[in-house]
Amino acid sequence: MTLIILSAYLAGIAIGAMAPQLAAQSAWATEPALMLLVFLVGLGTALDPSAWDRLRRAGPRAIALPVAVIAGTLGGAALVSPLLGDMAPADVLAVASGFGWYSLSAVMIAEARGEAMGALALMANISREVITLVFAGLMVRAFGPMAPVASAGATAMDVSLGIITIHGGREAGLVALASGFAVSLATPVFVGFFLSL
């Protein structure tokens, strides 16, 4: 799935470079596509009859882990922000607030800060997912079964869920569903907040 999305992104760059008028004419579709994406995520959650039961069974970690993921991500971004030259700290935090949900955060940031910042958000958040998919086994061995859940951020409930369950076990999979859901809910809130600063 990551390769498909990355290929679509690269195809968009190529088409935009070869046919800039076409790219400019299609810009109106960005916001409706974003709203459709958020709607479909909500619909998918509502159609999963066991989602709320799994969240309840996950226990206190279902709350503590996403809070730690959000705090750790934003804390790390704040620490490296001075090293990033001309990039405003609020923009660094907005990119980090994608928490791995590259499709949503990239569109929001591109609309507010331009295509270059949107591309940066896309690549930063895709990198988070790819790192989780590639290194989940090592993370579990080094830091325990919840490490890839934290690394995945918002993608713990979807794209990264399979690899988390394979390496961390069924309980890690249940916590991943709850954590990914909570972090996904927080993503548009935090991205919007930092973009408003």
Image: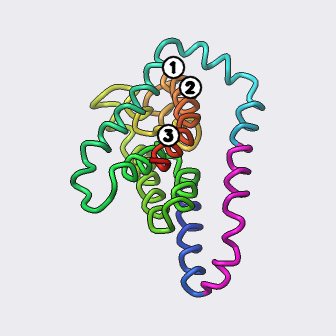
Which residue is drawn at the image coordinates 61% and 14% (left, top)?
56
For numbered disc 3, what is the local secondary structure? helix
Q: Residue 130 versus residue 26: which sits nearer the camera?
A: 26
For the N terminus, the image quarter is bottom right
Residue located 45% across and 43% down the image: 97
Structural distance between the alpha carbons of marks 1 and 3: 19 Å
User: What residue would you read off at disc 3?
Assistant: 190
Which region is colored magenta? 19-40
The residue singled out by tag 1 in the image is 62
The quadrant holding residue 4 is bottom right
The amino acid sitting under disc 1 is: Ala
- Local crowd at mark 3 within 10 Å, few (<14), some, or many (≥20)? many
> What percent of the width, then of the height, locates residue 178?
56, 25
* Direction bottom: furthest residue: 18
Q: Amino acid at mark 3?
A: Phe
Q: Earlier in the sequence, mark 2 or mark 1?
A: 1
The three-letter code of the residue at mark 2 reads: Ala
Q: Distance of mark 2 from mark 1, alpha carbons?
A: 5 Å
Q: Earlier in the sequence, mark 1 or mark 3?
A: 1
Percent x, y of residue 114: 50, 66
Q: From the image, tell me which residue sits under label 2.
A: 178
Q: Earlier in the sequence, mark 2 or mark 3?
A: 2
Q: Residue at x 48, y 46 (%)?
A: 98
Q: Taking 133 as reference, is 150 above or below it?
A: above
On the image, the x and y values in percent for residue 186 come to 54, 35
Cβ atoms at labels 2 and 1 below 8 Å apart = yes
